[in-house]
Amino acid sequence: MNLSPKWFKIFFAIFPFVSLFFFPWPMTLVASFAAGIVFPPLALIVGVLVDVLYSPGEGLFVGTLWGAGLAALAYGVRYFVRTRIM
């Protein structure tokens, strides 16, 4: 089996959605941040999905706020790493 970087990107894109159903929320935060470094808006998408699945109509968008914070942090880390390496 060829473990090219494409497979790792696919794994990082899918794992936060799987961890949403099978792992506790801190693991989902870590997985969302790790996926956010590869695909930055993915953390926000997972946060919105958390709100839709676990607190519909509640009015407090905690998952979306966590997702937006992680997405902003992932953008910052990605920018910092990209400017230091290149």
Image (cartoon, helix red, strand yellow):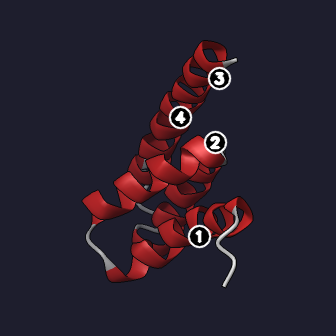
Q: Amino acid at mark 2?
A: Pro
Q: Which residue is located at x 30 percent, y 76 percent?
A: 23
Q: CA distance from mark 1 to mark 3?
A: 21 Å
What SS does tag 3 mark?
helix
Q: Quadrant of the N terminus?
A: bottom right
Q: Amino acid at mark 4?
A: Ala
What SS does tag 2 mark?
loop
> Which of the marked residues, 2 or 1, is nearer the chain's N terminus?
1
Q: Amino acid at mark 1?
A: Phe
Q: Which residue is located at x 62 percent, y 20 percent?
A: 85
Q: CA distance from mark 3 to mark 4?
A: 12 Å
Q: Which residue is mark 3?
A: 82
Between marks 3 and 2 in the image, the one whose residue lies nearer the viewer:
3
Q: Which residue is mark 2?
A: 40
Q: Position of residue 45 (x, y in %)?
A: 61, 56
Side (left or right) of 79 relative to 57:
right
> Which of the marked residues, 3 or 4, is nearer the chain's N terminus?
4
Camera-nearest residue between 30 and 43: 30
Q: As displayed, is residue 46 above or below residue 7?
A: above
Q: Which mark is residue 46?
A: none
Q: CA distance from mark 4 to mark 1?
A: 17 Å
CA neighbours of label 3 inside 10 A, class few (<14), some (14 to 19), many (20+):
few
Q: Which residue is mark 1?
A: 11
Between marks 3 and 4 in the image, the one whose residue lies nearer the viewer:
3
What SS does tag 1 mark?
helix
